Image: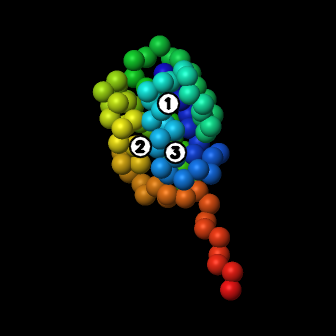
Amino acid sequence: MRVKINRDLCDAHLAFCERCLGRFLQYPMGYERRCFEELEDDGSDILTIELHSGDNDTVLKLDSSQRRLLAGEGWAYFVDFAVPIYRKPLKEPVV
C-alpha cells in the first residue's frame, strides 16, 4: 500500500498526529484519514508513506513489524528533521 500524507492539511498538534497515524497503521481501512491526499493499494506487503510536513518531505517504507513499532513509538522519532509540536504559531500575549 502507498499513502501520501500532507501534515500541513491538519493543524493538530504532534501528539494527536502521531496517534492518528498510529491508529491508521493498526487499522488501515477503518480509520479516518484527515491529512491523507492519496491512498493506493499497490499489492505490496510494504507500506510506503510519502510524508510532507512544512518544508520537509520524506518517504518511509515499512514492513509489518516496522508498522507496529511506528504505531507505538510515533513517526517523529523516525524522520531526519525536527518536527514542530504545533502546526500554527502560538498566539501573541495581549499586552
Q: Look at mark 3 in the image and give the residue it sits on.
A: 17
Report the residue at 40% width, 43% height from top: 74
> What's under tag 3, amino acid-wise?
Cys
| Foreground residue among 68 and 78 | 68
Please, which colouring scheme is shown?
rainbow
Q: Is residue 41 above or below residue 24?
A: above
Q: At numbered mark 3, what does the secondary structure look like: helix, strand or loop?
A: helix
Q: Are marks 1 and 3 in contact (CB under 8 Å)?
A: no
Task: Assess disc 1: are there few (<14), some (14-19) or many (≥20) residues with their C-alpha within 10 Å of its C-alpha.
Answer: some
Q: Look at mark 1 in the image and give the residue it sits on.
A: 24
The x, y position of residue 30, in whole percent, is 55, 22
Q: Which mark is drawn over residue 75?
A: 2
> From where the camera sits, is residue 3 visible?
yes
Q: Nearer the viewer, mark 2 or mark 3?
A: 3
Q: Are marks 2 and 3 in contact (CB under 8 Å)?
A: yes
Report the residue at 37% width, 30% height from top: 67
Quadrant containing the C terminus is bottom right
**Label 1, label 3: how many angstroms apart (C-alpha)?**
11 Å
> What's under tag 1, amino acid-wise?
Phe
> From where the camera sits, is residue 56 visible?
no
**Label 1, label 2: how many angstroms apart (C-alpha)?**
12 Å
In the figure, is residue 94 to the left or right of 57?
right
Report the residue at 47% width, 13% height from top: 43
**Label 2, label 3: how many angstroms apart (C-alpha)?**
9 Å
Q: At numbered mark 2, what does the secondary structure look like: helix, strand or loop?
A: loop
